[in-house]
Amino acid sequence: MDPIPVALGAISVYLYALGGRRASLRSVTATRRRRSPERLLRSGCFYAGVVAVVVALEPPVDHLSQRFFFVHMLQHLLLMMVGAPLIVLGAPWSRSWRPLPLGVRRPVARTVALSRAFGPVRAAAHWMASPVPAFVLFTADLAAWHVPQAYDLTLTDPAVHYVEHVSFLVLGIVFWAQILDSPPLRSHLDYPGRVAFAVLGGAASWILAVVLALAPHPLYSYAGHGHISALTDQQLAGGMMWGPGSVPLAVYVFYGLYRWLGEDEPGARRGRRSGRRRLEHAWPTRS
C-alpha cells in the first residue's frame, strides 16, 4: 500500500469536516445551524470523490494497472470522471482553508495575492480557469499520456506515473469546474455553453476510445503481461472509455439540457421578471 494517497486523503477529509463544523458553530440562527440538503449532498460528494481517488491509487487497482491496460484505463477514469467531478461538487475550497490557523492563512493569502513572485502563478491560474484553455489542457493531457511511448514510460518510471496521476486529477478538476458550480467558484459558461463543453469533452475521449477499440494490433509494447492477449486488453480499455467512461458526461449533458430548457419556461421567465422588479424596488433608478 502506498501511504501517500491515504495520508493526503485523510488530511483533506479532516480539514473539510473540521471546516464544516466550525462554520456550523459560528452560525447564529437555528436555521443556519441545521444542515441543509445541499450541504449534505456536497459533503457526500466530496467524501466520495476522495474515496474514488484513493481507490484508484491503491491496491488492488494500482497493482493490476501494471499488468492490464484496461485496469490502467479504469484508474484514469476514476481520477478524471469520478473523483474530479465529485470533488468539484463538494466545493472544498473555502471549507478546507478555514480550519488552518489565522497566523498561517493571512501570510499565505497575502503572499499568493500580492507577491510579485507569484504573479506568473496567478496569471497561469487565471488562464487555466477559462473554458478554452481548460478544454485544451484536459484533452491534450488525455491524448499525451496515451501516446505509446509515454504510456510505456509510466509503467517503468514511478515518478512519471505519479506525475500522470496528478495531471489527470488536477486537470480533471479544472475541466469539471467549467460546467459544475463549486461555491465560491462559478462557471463562466451559461447552460448552452456548458452542454457544448461537455459534448466536446466527451467527443475527445470517444476518439481515443475508438482508436484503442478498433486498432488491428496492439499499440503499446509494454502491454500483454496479464492473462489475456494484448489486443483484447487494449480493446477492453477502449470499450471502458467509450462506455462507462462516457456516463458522467452524458449525465451532465441531460442535466444541462434540462436546466437550459427550463430557463425558457413561463415560470422561469416570471421568476426572472419578479427578481428584476425586486431589484429595481431595492435600487430605484433615477430619471
Image (cartoon, grey):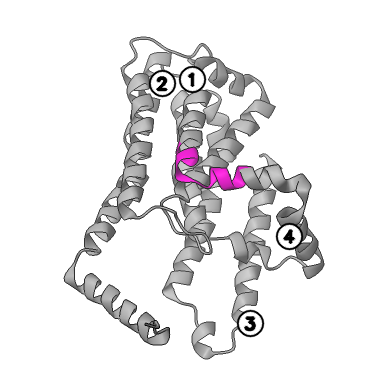
Choose the circle earlier in sequence order: 2 or 4. Answer: 4
Residue that numbered label 1 is attached to: 226
Disc 3 residue type (three-letter): Leu
Name the residue: 32% across, 54% down: 191
Name the residue: 41% across, 51% down: 179
Choose the circle earlier in sequence order: 4 or 1. Answer: 4
Residue 109 circle label: 4
Disc 4 residue type (three-letter): Ala
Q: Label 3, label 4: how many angstroms apart (C-alpha)?
A: 24 Å
Q: Looking at the picture, does residue 268 appear above or below residue 231?
A: below
Q: Which of marks 3 and 4 is in front?
A: 4
Q: Nearer the viewer, mark 4 or mark 1?
A: 4
Disc 2 residue type (three-letter): Asp
Q: Label 2, label 1: how many angstroms apart (C-alpha)?
A: 8 Å
* Discs 3, 4 touching: Cβ within 8 Å: no
Q: Label 1, label 3: how many angstroms apart (C-alpha)?
A: 53 Å
Q: Which residue lies furthest to the bottom in this view?
A: 29
